[in-house]
Structure formats: C-alpha cells, structure tokens
Amino acid sequence: MSEDKKPATNTLGLTKSDYKGGPSTMCKGCGHDRISEAIIQASYDLGLDATNILKMSGIGCSSKTPAYFLGNAMGLNSTHGRMPSFATGAHIANTSMTPIGVSGDGDSASIGMGQFVHILRRNPKMVYIIENNGVYGLTKGQFSATADRQSPSKRGAYPREESIDLCGLALELGATFVSRSFSGDKKQLVPLLKAALSFDGLSFIDVISPCVTFNNHEGSTKSYTHQKEMGVTFHDPYYVSPQDPIDIEYEQGELREVTLHDGSKLLLRKLEHDFDPTDRNASFDAIQRTRNKGEVLTGLIHIDVEARSMSSNSGLTDQPLSMLAQQELRPASGVLDRINDSFRI
Amino acid sequence: MSEDKKPATNTLGLTKSDYKGGPSTMCKGCGHDRISEAIIQASYDLGLDATNILKMSGIGCSSKTPAYFLGNAMGLNSTHGRMPSFATGAHIANTSMTPIGVSGDGDSASIGMGQFVHILRRNPKMVYIIENNGVYGLTKGQFSATADRQSPSKRGAYPREESIDLCGLALELGATFVSRSFSGDKKQLVPLLKAALSFDGLSFIDVISPCVTFNNHEGSTKSYTHQKEMGVTFHDPYYVSPQDPIDIEYEQGELREVTLHDGSKLLLRKLEHDFDPTDRNASFDAIQRTRNKGEVLTGLIHIDVEARSMSSNSGLTDQPLSMLAQQELRPASGVLDRINDSFRI
Amino acid sequence: MDPVINDFSIRIATANGTGSQTSNIVIQRALMKMGLAASSKNLFPSNIAGLPTWFQIRVSPGGWQTMASQWQVLLPLNPATIGRDLRESEPGTVVIENSAMKTADSEFEGLCRYSVPFDQLAREISDAKLRPRLKNLIYVGVVAQLFGIPIDAIRAALGSVFPGKETVIELNVNAAQIGFDFASENLKKQDRWKFEPADQIKHRILIEGNEATALGAIWGGVSVVAWYPITPASSLAEALEKHIGDCRDADPEGGKRFVVIQAEDELAAIGMALGAGWAGARSMTSTSGPGISLMGENLGFGYFAEIPTVVYDVQRVGPSTGLPTRTQQSDLLQVAFQSHGDTRFPFLLPANASEAFEFSCQSYDLADKYQTPVLFLSDLDLGMNTWISDPMPEPTGDMQRGKIATDEVIARLENWGRYRDVDGDGIPYRTIPGVTLHPDTAHLTRGSGHNEDAEYSESPEVYKNNLDRLSRKIDGMVVDLPAPVLTEGDAPLGVIAFGTTDLAMQEALESLDSKPAYLRIRAYPFHEEVEAFLAEHQQVLVIEQNQQGQMAQLLRMHLPQHADRIESATYYGGLPLTTQIVREAIEQQLGVETR
Amino acid sequence: MDPVINDFSIRIATANGTGSQTSNIVIQRALMKMGLAASSKNLFPSNIAGLPTWFQIRVSPGGWQTMASQWQVLLPLNPATIGRDLRESEPGTVVIENSAMKTADSEFEGLCRYSVPFDQLAREISDAKLRPRLKNLIYVGVVAQLFGIPIDAIRAALGSVFPGKETVIELNVNAAQIGFDFASENLKKQDRWKFEPADQIKHRILIEGNEATALGAIWGGVSVVAWYPITPASSLAEALEKHIGDCRDADPEGGKRFVVIQAEDELAAIGMALGAGWAGARSMTSTSGPGISLMGENLGFGYFAEIPTVVYDVQRVGPSTGLPTRTQQSDLLQVAFQSHGDTRFPFLLPANASEAFEFSCQSYDLADKYQTPVLFLSDLDLGMNTWISDPMPEPTGDMQRGKIATDEVIARLENWGRYRDVDGDGIPYRTIPGVTLHPDTAHLTRGSGHNEDAEYSESPEVYKNNLDRLSRKIDGMVVDLPAPVLTEGDAPLGVIAFGTTDLAMQEALESLDSKPAYLRIRAYPFHEEVEAFLAEHQQVLVIEQNQQGQMAQLLRMHLPQHADRIESATYYGGLPLTTQIVREAIEQQLGVETR
Ligand SMILES: Cc1ncc(C[n+]2csc(CCOP(=O)(O)OP(=O)(O)O)c2C)c(N)n1
Ligand SMILES: Cc1ncc(C[n+]2csc(CCOP(=O)(O)OP(=O)(O)O)c2C)c(N)n1
Ligand code: SF4
Ligand code: SF4
Ligand SMILES: [Mg+2]
Ligand SMILES: [Mg+2]
C-alpha cells in the first residue's frame, strides 16, 4: 500500500545505522554511550568513509566503546594507557587513515600520562577523546587523577591529590586543538567532533562523562546516580542501578548548573560565541579564569589553525608506508655492493 | 711557627668539605658539577645534617651526581625515569628524611613524565632538581623533550616536537614550589636550594645546565662548547673537549643574555625582586609573558606557603614507619580471634 | 526415588549487575547456617553490568569445595544463555525456569522442570522502586522451599549480609517468602535432592583468599602499601585498607602506623614499594599479570640492589588482557626469571585461605632476611572466591628483620661492606637510613655494577663474585620457605601440584582406588624433598593450570636428572579446576603406566 | 731472538673522551691497509669522559678476531690503571710507557720496556689548541715504527677515518711522524714482534654489528622505526637513520619511504612498532635489557593479538643497569617467556656481522609470515665492535608478506575469520587497514579473549583452541628459522654454542687435538637437528655467556629426554669471550669424560 519509508542517507548514501557498531555493554545510562552516539552522528553528518578511520583505545569501560560505533572501521583495543603509541604507529604506517582514539581518565591521566603528554607534543592527525568520569569504572570505582579533590569515592575517602585539568595540561604542552564538552550535550559535542575530524593535527576532546555506577555520592561533580532508595540504603555492591542518561542543552556564554541524580552540582561554562580560540593567551586566560571560579569551561578552547601535524611535517611520501611494494622498500641490486665497498678499508 | 689555618665551620661545626662526595666523573666543565657544588654550599650554609637527607636519582649523567655531594647521606640511584616513585616510597617510610631527588630532562621529561606529573600531585616533602641540558648526555647526545625546537642536534637534525617548559607544566599541575635557575648562577641557585630544603612540600627546581659535550652547535640555547678549532672541523666522536664552566651573575628583574662558547645565546630573565610568587595567577602570567618573548624566566616562580605536604596530610605517626617495632606493627594477640570470629557465618 | 541428602550442586545463571550475586550469597550462607560446608564459585564476566554470570553452590558429604563439573539444579535466569545452559545440563537435571522466558518445551526434554512466573511474582513486591533489587530474592525462596532450607536460615543469612539493617533484612525476607510460598503452593517436588542440617563447618570461617592475604600482610607488619587497581588483585589492597585501621593501633595521638597509596600505575607502585623497602619499612604491592609484566625492570633492580619487598600476583588468564575474570596459574616462568639478565625470584604458592594468611605474613620475614623481592602467587580462584577455611593461624615466633648493619655489627665485623658476605650464606648486613647511623654505612645504592663496599665497579671479577653470591643467597632461601607437603600413595605414580589445584587433587585422591603419592610444592626455589620425590617415582605427573606446563618446565630445568620422567597435565580454560579433570589425568597416566 | 710475524696483540689503556679511540682505530686500519685482518675489542666504561678504557688489537696468522686473553704489547697510558695494567701483563710483555708518569722501575720488572716522553713530544705539535686532539697520534707513530707499520699505511688509515679532510689528515700524520721519528732515533728494538704485509682480508669488509643489523633492516623493508636510546643498542637505530635515506629511494617528489621516531621510552617504542605492524608497515624497535624488561606487557599483546614486528635486543650485562658497556647473552629466558601468561617468543641468534645483516633482513619476513613479534638477540660484542666480515649478502628471493585477507581470499575461504586456522598451520589470514577492504574484515583487534572471528569471548573452549593454535604456529616457525650449523668432530663430546661465542669456539676447535662435534644454534624454537645432536652425543656441553646457563635451561625444558646429559659452561664477566675460556671448558669436560 504505502511506500516503504526509506531511512535518510548522507552524501555517501549511507544511513546513520551504517555508522553503528555492536550492541553496547555499558551500564544503562552511562555517559560513554552518549559519546559513542555523538561519534556516530558526527560521522554520519560528515559523510565519513569509516574505512579511513582507525578506532584506537586502551583499557577501561571507555576503551571498550570502539566496539559500539563505526562497525566498518578497523580498530585496535590495546593495553592500558598505551593507546597513544599504538595510534601513532598505526597512523604513521598509513597517514591516509585517521585514528579516533578513545581513552579514559584512568587510561590517559594515570598510567598513560607519559604517552598522553608526548603524543600532544608529536601532534599526529587524529582525534583524541578522553571519556572523563573521574573514576576507574571497569575496576569498580577507585579514584582517577581527574577526580575532584572534594569528591568522596564510593567508600567515602577523599582523593588526597590535586585533580588534573586535562585541557589546561594540553594547552600548556602546546596542543593545537583543545576542547571540552559534556557527554549529554549533543549540540556541543557533535560539532566539536566534526571540527576535530577535519583538523590537521591532534584534536583533543575532554568529555565529562558521568559514571552511573561508581562515583555515585553526594558532592561529586561527575556522577549521576544514587544508592539510596526510599530511605533504605542497601550498600549492595552487586546491584547496578539502571539510569537515564543526562542530556543537557545550553547556550554559548551561558553558565549551566547541571544537577546530577544524587543532587550534586556541576558548573559548566560554555565559551562565548565571540571567543577567539586561535589566541593562545586568551585560551590560557579563559581556562584560568573559569577554574578560579570553580567552573568547568566547555567548548573549543584553543585551535592553532597554522599548526601542521606530525604527518604533514614528516616529509613522507603520499603512498602509505603499509602499501609500499618490495621494489620501493628494498634498495635496487647494486646498492648493497656500493655499501659493502664503502666498508672496505 | 704560624698556627694551622682551620677551615671555616657551620652551625654544626662541620666544614664545607664535610658536605662533599666522591670525585666527579662528569666531563670537565659540565653544568651538573656546578649544581652539585651549589647543593654542597646550600647544605653547608644551612647547617644541614646530611644523615637526614636521602639522595635519590634515576639514570643519566645528572643522576650520577648524587655520588659527588653529601657523602654522609644515604642515596639510591634507581632506574631510568623512576626516581619519583622510589623517593616517594623512601620518604613515606621515614618522613623525618628529606629526599633530594636529582634527575635529568631525559629522565624526568621523557621516560619519567608520568611519575614526574604524579609526584607533583602528591606533593611529598622533598627537593626535586632537574639538571636540564636539553639532551641525553649519557647516551651521547640525542634530543630530550626539553630540547629547543630551533636547536639542531650534533648530527644536525631538528627536534620535530614542541619543547616542554617544565616550570609551566609544574605550575599547571598545581605544584606548590616552582623555580628555575642556571647551573652557573650560584648567587641565585644556592638561595633557591636553601628555600627548597626548608619547604614543606615538593620544591621543584628546573636548573638549566649546559652539556659541554653534546648539544654543542650553533643556535643551541643550552650548550657551551664547540667542535670547530682553527677552522678545522674534526668531527671526532671520541674526543671530549674539556671546558671551563660558565658562571654568571645578574640582578633581579634583569634580562641576561648568556653568550655560550659556540656563540649561541640564551636569554635569561630574572624575576623582579617585588614579584609575589604566592599569587598563582601572577606566576602563570609571568611564565606566559616571558615565554612569549622568547625569554627563559628564572627565580622562585611560585610558592604556596599554605600548601601541606603529602606527609603532613597523611595523618601518620611521628615515628618513622621504618622504625616501628613488632608490637606496634602486629596486632595484639586476641585481635586475630576477633577477626576470625567476624568471618564465622 | 530415594532422596539424596546434601550431595548436589546448584548453578544459577544471571546477568551481572542485577544484584543476583547477593541472592546467591544468601543461599550459600543459609546453607552454612544449617551447618553445611556450602562452597561457591563465582564465574563473572569482565564487565560491570549486563553480561552473563554464573554462580555455583556445592554441598557434599565430604564438604568438598572444588567446583563440581556438573550441577544437579540449574536456574537459567539469563535469556542470553538459557539455551546453552540447558544444553550443557545432564539428563535429569532439575531446572527452575522463569516461565516468562517462553523457552520451547523441547529444550527441557529429559530435564526435571519447575516453571516459576518470576516476573509476575515480582509484582507482589509492593514498592516498584525497590523491586529490581528485591526480586532476585524470589528465587532464593523457591530454592529454599524445594530443597529444604528453612526461611529462618534465609533470614539469618541476610543478617550476615546486611548486618544491623533490620528494615533491609525484612524487605528481603518478605521477597524470599513470595518465592517460598509460590513453591509450596504450586510446585510438586519431583526430584530427589534435599538439604538437611549437618555439622560440617565446625570451627571454620568463610573468607575470600584476597582478604585472608591482606590480613596476613597486616600481621606480617606491612606499613607501606602501594598498588594500582586490577582485577583480580584489587580486592586484596582494598581489604587491607579496610582492615588495617581497625587491627593496627594508632599512636596515642591517633597517628597512623601505615600508609596505603594508590599509585598512578604498576611501575610507580613497585618503585614506591622498593623505595620504602630500601628505607626500612615493610612494604608491598599487589597486582595481576599485566602489572607484573610492567614491574620487570624494577624487580630486577630490587634483585640486584638487594631490597626487600613483597609482590602479590593474583594470577588471571593471560596472555595480555586475556580473560581478566578467569583463573590460571600461568605467570610462573615470567615471575621466576622476570627482568633481563641473570635474575631469579623466589615465590610462594598458597593453596587455601589460611595458607594465604600464613604465607603472606611470612613473606615479610623472607624479604627482610634475604633482602630481595619475594613474590606471592595466588590466583583468582583463591583470591576472589569465598572459602570455608580453617581460621587464620596466629603467627608463632617473632618477626625476623634480618641482618642489619648496626654500630655493633660494624664494630664486630671490622670489614663491613654493604654487599660483603661475612657469614658465608651470601647475605650481607643491610643499611636502613636513620637506623644504621655509623658513618661507614652511608653509600649510594645502585643497579649498576658495585663491589662489596657498594662502590661503582666495572670489574669482571667483582661482578661475577657478586652475582654468584646473589645466587647462593637465593638458593639458601629454601631453609625458610614453606616445605612441600607429601601425601603417601600406593600407585606407581607420583603427582605434583601446587596452589589451588590442591583441592581437586585431594578430592581426586579420595575417590581413586589406587592412589598415587602426591607432593604439593609450596615455594620456589625447590626443596630437596622435591628432588627426592622425583627420584623415588618412576613416573611423575605435574598437574597445573596453564598451557605450557610451567611448573613441569621449572622442574626439568632445575632437576635435569629427572627431566625425562616428568609428565605434564594441564588445564587452562580459566574456570576453577574440577576434580574430574584431575582424576582423569591421573587415571590416564596410570593406565598408560600399567597397560 | 727470532722475530714473530703477525701473531700478537696490542693493548692500549687510556681514559675515555681523550680521543685515543681515534688513534686506536687508525692503528687497526693501518694494519688492514697492510692486508692484515687486524681485529679490535673496545672495552669502554659507562661514562662520557675520564674513566678507564682499553682497546685491544689482535693480528694472527689465522686472522682470528676473538679477543686474546693476553697481549704482547701494552701501552699503559692511563695513570689511573697503569699499576694494574702492568701487573696483569705476562713476563716479557712489551710496554710502551709514558716516561712522564714516573712509575717505579720495579713495576717493569720482567717486562720489555720502551720509555717515551709523550708529553714532551706533544709540545712539538705547534698549535696548542689542537694539541689535545692530536697528541694521541704520537703513540700511533711509535707503534708504527716499532712494529713495522709504514707511515703511508697510517696516512691511508687516516684517510678512511677523515675521508676528504686533507688538512685534518696531514695534521694527524705529522703528529704520528713525531712519534715515528722519536722511536727511530731513540728506541732500540729489543722485542721480537713484527707486522708484515699479508693478504688476510681479501674481499672482506670492516663493519660494526649494529650497522650491519641496521642495513639488514633496510633490506628487510622496514619503514617504521621507533626507538629509545640505550647503550649498546643506540648505534643500531642511529646507523639505520644514517643509511636509510641514502639506500632507499624517495618518491619522485622527494617523499620519504620511512620514518624514524625517537620515542619517549621503550613502552612507547614497542607500542608504536606494534601499531605500525598492525597497520601493515614493516616495523621495528631496538633496545637492550632494561628496555626489553619494559616491553613485556606490550610484547604479550603482540603475541596474543598476532601482530608482526621486529624487536632487536642488543644484550649487555644485567641484571638491572648492570654493566651497560659490557657484553653478555643473558636475556634468553626473559625473552623466551616475556610477559605474563603462556607466551613464547621466537628469537634469532646471529654470530657475526654478515649474519646480523642476513637475520635482520629475514626477521621481517618471519614476523609477517607468522604474525608475531620476532626477537633478534645480538650483544654488545657483536653490536659495538668492528668486525672484519664477509660482505653483507644480497637477499635472495622476494619478501614474504604472509597471509593477507584479500577479497580473493575471503571469497575463496567462505568462512574467513581473522583468527581462523584454515590451512592447518595455525596461521590465519590477517587484515591490513586500507588493503583488506572487504567489509567482513573490519573488526576490533584486542588483547582480551576472542574467537576465530575476532569477537570478544570468555568461552573456555574458544580460549583454549586459540592458545593451542598460537602454540602450533610458533612451533611451526622452525621451518623458516635459520637452522643450526653442525661441525663434525672426533671427540666423544658434543658442544653447543650460539651468537658471539661462535668465534671463540671456532678458534678453540682449530687448536684442539681431539675435536668435539659443534652445533651452533641460530634460533629458538629449536630445530629437530638440535634434538638429533643431543641424541647422538653421550655428553653435551653448552657454552654460553651468562650465569645461569640459560640456553642449557631452555634445552632441558624442551628436550627433557636429554636433559640429564646437558652440561653447562658459562662465562659472564662481561668481556668478549676468549678462546682460552672455551678451550679450557672443553678440555675439562673431555678430561672428565675420558678419565
Ligand atoms: C597494566 C594494567 N593495569 C591495570 C589494569 C586494570 N584496569 C583495567 S581498566 C582500569 C581503569 C580504567 O579507568 P578509566 O580509563 O578511567 O576508564 P573507565 O572505566 O572509567 O571508562 C584499570 C586500572 C589493566 N588492565 N592493565
Ligand atoms: C629503561 C632505560 N632506557 C634507556 C636507558 C639508557 N639511558 C641512560 S641515561 C639516558 C638518558 C639520560 O638523559 P638525561 O636524563 O637528560 O640525563 P643527562 O645525561 O643529560 O644528564 C638513557 C636514555 C636506560 N638506562 N634505561
Ligand atoms: S561502570 Fe561507569 S563507566 Fe563503566 S559502563 Fe558502568 S557507568 Fe559506564
Ligand atoms: S656528557 Fe654532557 S651532561 Fe654528561 S657529563 Fe659530559 S657534559 Fe655533563
Ligand atoms: Mg574513568
Ligand atoms: Mg639531559
């Protein structure tokens, strides 16, 4: 009778579901799933050819998510904290491939800090997303280095150390694309991802992504679940309460107080629309200023449009190294004779 | 005939040579030796009891130097890049001991970056010195992560990556004592060391310390030797030219252009005497401003006098953990019965 | 059909994160309240919520805690695995199914089926918000009614799970009662399985291996703990942090006598542990495979610089990330020769929870006495399952802090040097900053070549002598390491096993007509008894939970004269070892031998 | 006193950083210009300037390049070591001393002493600023005059050291002439040592092992190099970077076909190498002991995820920092079982520079074909000393990239899966992003449990099958690994050695009356020939350069049926192995056997 409703397609003639991956195994309501969705949306919008993407990750709940988006892209789920080096190697082997690196705050800010710092310096063309929940999700709720100093963990202890501001750190290290968003802020995150995918260099996105299951306590700025129900505290370590994800929308320049499920508050400050992210001093100032006020700055904090990526700088041939043939790799016959001769005394 | 000239002594009745170590095996003129001398001087001036110091280091020329100062102090020359963790463990085992950690830019800014970042967050009471020459001395002249972007190495290649400003990084990470000096500027370095030794927290000192033997090329900002003599370039990789160390003296607020042996220039800007290092925003500004001008800021850049060290925060007993006796460590008899009971179903 | 009393297993299949684990524990504890040594195995996924998980409870007349290779009762409550769960069940297995799942009748063929409308029953829980947490208790009630667990035992079990929380307990009991009532009214007992009170537990306790290990460390005097989270080791450090404040008195001003540091990674954790060990504190770190691999370089430093510390490796399935929530004994070769160069690391192999306590406690004496990192190798099965265990034994004797270069020692020895072997046992007198105050003791500890006075040296002779002394020292440890345990047999076969394999070995031995002699190795390097055992048996079978037969390989290396008679039987699927696997391996070996 | 021609060694003791190394090389090369196979050993400290260093040059009729255990000529030019240098010299040794050192005459007793006022002679070098660099050439002149090296040979040698730098060459020749003239005028030849031209070198080249290894990598097609500096491996990556731009053509626009990345550490270096290998490039990293220890976790990932890459371990003296500038073969056990869990890594054992080239080149085919990290184990002796070597052999045959899941393969196999063993050899068809474009090839490579289709799995059977396939794959490599080299003998003994021990073995064999059979192992896992060799010999001696007899241990593990007959002889002082040590070990063994 009626015609079949065809799903919408993008410039490549692909539907949005062509950009999906396998079913997620995150906890229901986990912020990480929202980020996967944003990646799917941005890729669809851009008409991305997923076979030119390399999904790279470390270890953690966040690092599992590459299984849940861009099912047509190859991916590598490496070791804990080492995504940056694997991504660098994979990308340089074939610079026509853009890595989307997904990491966690434990993965990048604790064990992976060294590689995080050094990949920022190297600046390969890739998207580097940290799904930042201030906690080790997969190992069940220990603090990470981005945990707020004032947040008690599930067992009630306070982290004793200074929390790391990943965007401030990236900026200090000379990163050329520094941004932050919130997992449930599709309106901000999707465009940021699109910009990131188009940038010639490392685009860093710090995405605050609340962990439903751990970090769930009053006073936390990165969580949105609760353990108390009907005045009865269960303390059941084996029960993971399914939650609805938090979605938010707010305007540029606005300060948004996100009230989380447990009643705790997170102050997000979106950059003004006339903010000039190409001015590095202004970027420093903006971070510094909001930080002093206890706000978390979101948006494209810094971009250096003149920066060139490691790959652009490397003087490499256009043909991927991974595809060079024997005649391009092995010196012509005769060269070894010449070399041998040069070692004759 | 005349009375023996007795050497001067300090408050402990010790002479300066009581603070010396074994003979140095650095190259003649190496900046690192000047730093050892400054440590000896500061310790003598303070009347330090060296048996309360733990000399800690990693691997590198710089990391060898603890053998050359404070011969009465115990020391531990650990593995490459891991001094921070060894120092943390040693100090917490006995908080009445203050570590003087000596590291290199390779040791701390490359392989050791993760531990460097995290010890800054933890903030144990210790002095953390990076003898910064922009180069891997002991492995013969490869770039380190603090090499200037514009400096060609001995073989003429340029580092492709952004150079790390260790003080900027420390400040961003919330370090509570951030300072920089030059190995040959005794007048600045000795007082800084004295302040550092008295501070309750991690006192970070980035000391620019030219490598005589490598990094020796025109245009470098961290070297002071030369390969050309009489117009004849030897390129003799086996000859290490002995040099005089560079000593400088300049006033607060002054910009000092240090002309190095090879003709290259280093612009040092000493902080004004009225600079308020307790204002963290001012510290950020000062670093940022000088950096924009291509100057290297020296002096006590930041100090948070209210900060408390890891040890002060840890709620530890005053008695060193290393000295607790069995009766303080092993629960009284009876406790285990109670514990066993608690596991009875 | 005669009833079978107290001799069957219940397998419960659910998804993780649903809270079913609490219900499972309640069943186990309720049985214990009846005096039954109900053991449990938790087979959980590497995931937080939603993936398949199984819990298996076993009761047997012998009180065996080995995982049963078959279950007699199945609760296939996870739609994702029900097909497979049913297929893997033997004919006659009792199945308590959720009638809402609408599984084809054909799938239940040959099985003894009870259908329960769990979802419908759940609606009887009045509060909708609490329903998801409480509904699992319904199957507890059904099981209780069908197999003879009194509701009072359930209530008592809940009391031990939620101590003091009367409201919570009541809410849970009520939910269980729903299942209980449904079963009494609607299910007609068609099977022969039954629980009855007994006196199997006696003085024993229920404890996780990791918790016992952690308590052992406290009694061992650990004061600096540096760790990095990783399954299945996390609960060790977490249990330690939980208990140490209670067990160890603070000073009169309330100052703590320990510190627990969550390090940024395993490289830092071992660095801190070694730094603290060097400075004289008893220190430790705990991890699993990937962390052990990262510790290699620093462990080598500890070996060569001679620094005491204790490293716990709760083994999981490798290689790489492997199966992080499954059990294995596959880090032996890695640990024994960890780090480049000629190194060797002693390790301890606890087989049960009370040994976990004992060896853990003892490790600190060993590390101090021999001035070297000591490895403690348990596994996920021991570490993360609960065990009905002998009580943890109060350590006898005083702490041994080993040889320390006190002023008295230095005066006595004349020629003291940090690395000088004055007693002929390879063990020098060590320094502790702030304790050894004699000016001669100041030196720079290093991982590079050093002479007996701890001075830098590149001399070949100095180097060789030092390495030989180190080797002598490690070999000499056997006198203090836990000796192997011998069980005599009558069959012409000797069997060697270690760690958690012990339980399956013991049960297998009981069931075998012709019994091989059994040697349980408890430490490396090996005692002389191991050589003697090999010498006495024409054929030796090493049973272990890894692919390569790593213990067999270590034995072949160190006792080459017997290498040709060492056979290897391995299981490495990651599940707790069953008696059946062990028995078959032995029978096969005996068959080959006697044929 | 009859002259002895071309059969003695010269040992030169100086401090490092003084430029003496240049002079030493000039002597060696001058001898080569005379047609002599003058070999050299450089014994340098872990330091940049000022510590003791020795350089030993050997000429022998057989052209042996083994380090001589004694020297016939000594130049004790370092005041810090002169006493010991003299004491270690045998009676009759010729000593060329610096008369300014004022060593007591008694120290020279029994030695043949030539005194040279080096400092005074140095003043004849007119330019004071250049004097420190040139003055070492004076001893070159003295040696030349005393033992018969023509000044022209010195000049020619300098030409090869400073190619094209005529002024520099002249300045140096002039300085050498000062010494030469002094010797002719003042020293009366009292010894019998003499060089004479000969034709020992033939077609051979002079090359460092690391440089040959680097060239092998270029010919092997490496395109991604990630490394971190460490002695004695640095010169491998540095040589590679030096040569690759010249040897490998850029594209027509000048685009490079390789990249060399100095990583921030070894963890990152192996990560990059594996990332690149996974993405399809031929990749490598190079390091030494401490770096290998840090790579453990990622190597295990490479093993389990099946990623090709080549890892060079230029071994130095461990454990820990050990003696970083001394040689050893002590990483075997570490490398074979690196990483937690059941892993196994194949490794290659080159014995000389041309094999270094060959094996290095071949490693890339092996890694690609077997989809696994391949280890290349050389050592400081091979890597950092110069060797008179057969020319590097042009590789025969084409590069082998192994099985790749092209569209054609996928169509043909129907049931392709990333980890499915369709050919029965354990080797699956791998994917390369951008090359394997079939939609079915997209998957997530992981270090956690996975099935044949690369999907996440916690199934025990899937895990076991996968691990067994991996094991089969690694075992299967022997067909492509370099086979052992057998030298028949007549004594009732078989000797096994490998790597740089080969040279001393060969020289020892030549000198022995009764010759044992000699098997040189060139790779792990072992070929059948190794088993056969063990089976054929009642007694087998494994000679190696480490403390534990690590190769002997590997043999005992893998060939237990022969374990009881495997004896071990080890040297681990860190100096290059001498023939004497090997000969004595064999003689002792034969003595025991024949007595
Ligand atoms: C070497 C190593 N150490 C420890 C672990 C255990 N581990 C797995 S995930 C994880 C932390 C993950 O935290 P994060 O990166 O923040 O991810 P999240 O789960 O919070 O998304 C840890 C410590 C590991 N897999 N490997
Ligand atoms: C794990 C490891 N990797 C590499 C090395 C080799 N190594 C020794 S010192 C050094 C660099 C030292 O540089 P830096 O810290 O800047 O000290 P400097 O010599 O310049 O003072 C390196 C890479 C090592 N010892 N250990
Ligand atoms: S544990 Fe936290 S981070 Fe992990 S899946 Fe659940 S909600 Fe997400
Ligand atoms: S190499 Fe450089 S850093 Fe090392 S001792 Fe010499 S001058 Fe100093
Ligand atoms: Mg996290
Ligand atoms: Mg340096």
Image (cartoon, coloured by chain):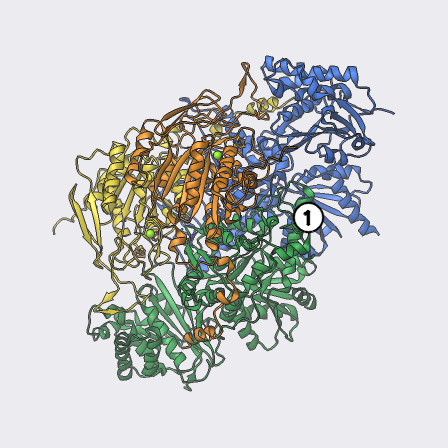
Chain colours: A orange, B yellow, C blue, D green
Front position in the image: B134 or B330: B134
Residue D218 can be seen, yes or no: yes
**Most distant residue in the left direction:** B1
Q: State which chain disc 1 sits on.
A: D
A29 relative to A307, above or below: above
Residue extending furthest toward the front: A1
Q: Position of residue B28 (x, y in %)?
A: 26, 58
Q: Is residue C537 above or below residue D232?
A: above
User: Would residue C492 be seen by someone viewing this image from the given angle?
Assistant: no
Where does the N terminus of chain D fall, quadrant-wise? bottom left
Question: Relative to C314, is B182 above or below?
Answer: below
In percent of width and height, residue D516 lies at 62, 72
The residue closer to the viewer here, D18 or B8, is D18
Give the residue pinned by disc 1: D465
Name the spot of residue D202 as percent of width and height, x first: 47, 81
- Which element is circle 1 on? helix
Q: Quadrant of residue B201?
A: top left
Q: Residue furthest right?
A: C1
Quarter of the figure that contains the C terminus of chain D: bottom right
Query: In the depicted view, which residue is nearer to us: B342 or C423?
Result: B342
Query: Is residue B33 left or right of C247 when viewed as pictured?
Result: left
| Amino acid type assigned to the residue bearing label 1 in the image | Asn
In the image, residue A251 sits, relative to residue C128, either above or below, namely: below
Query: Is the distance from the Cβ of mark 1 to the nearest ligand 1 atom less than 8 Å?
Result: no
Give the tally of numbered discs. Answer: 1
Q: Quadrant of residue A256?
A: top left
**Mark 1 neighbour class, 10 Å CA radius: few under 14, some 14 to 19, many 20 or more:** some
